[in-house]
Image: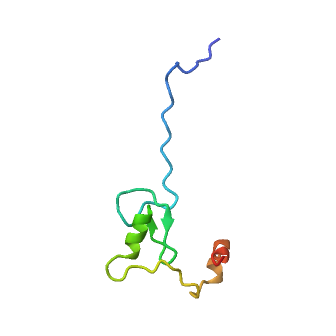
Amino acid sequence: GGGETPAAGKEEPAAPAPPPRMGECEVCGEGRPAKYRCPACAVASCSLDCSRAHKSQAGGGCSGKRDRASFKDIREFTDTDMVSDY
């Protein structure tokens, strides 16, 4: 037959990894993928240490608690907003 088969031991190059879903950590700046997002200000962090550092930054930091009474336009309202109170 004239069909070609890949040579044994030869692998296809690996596809590049997709970018992290939440981007990179905005606290440590080390380029690690973010795992957490601050409920109050949406800053992405990669670890509990970075989350704590974000809350204790100079100038008062962040409370880490979202404002439940803040106005949200109905056109921006999603299912996630609906379940965020539970």
Please name the residue shown 45% across and 80% down the image.
63
| Left or right of residue 59, residue 9 in this image | right
Task: Using the image as rendered, state which of residue 37 and residue 71 is in the foreground.
Answer: 37
**Where's residue 22, x and y in %?**
50, 62
Who's the residue at 41% across and 70% down the image? 52
Query: Which of the 4 image quadrants contains residue 51?
Result: bottom left
Task: Report the number of discs.
Answer: 0
Q: Colour mode?
A: rainbow
Q: Give the quarter of the figure containing the N terminus.
A: top right
Residues 47 and 15: in front is: 47
Furthest toward the top, the residue is 1
Residue at 41% from the left image edge and 56% from the top image edge = 32
Q: Is the residue 34 above or below the residue 72 in the image?
A: above
Question: Where residue 44 sits: x, y (%)?
Answer: 46, 67
Horizontal side, residue 27 vs residue 66: left or right: left
Which of the 4 image quarters holds residue 74? bottom right
Residue at 46% x, 60% y: name it. 34
Front-most of 48 and 69? 48
For the C terminus, the quadrant is: bottom right
- Left or right, 78 with reference to 46: right
**In x, y percent, where is residue 49?**
40, 65
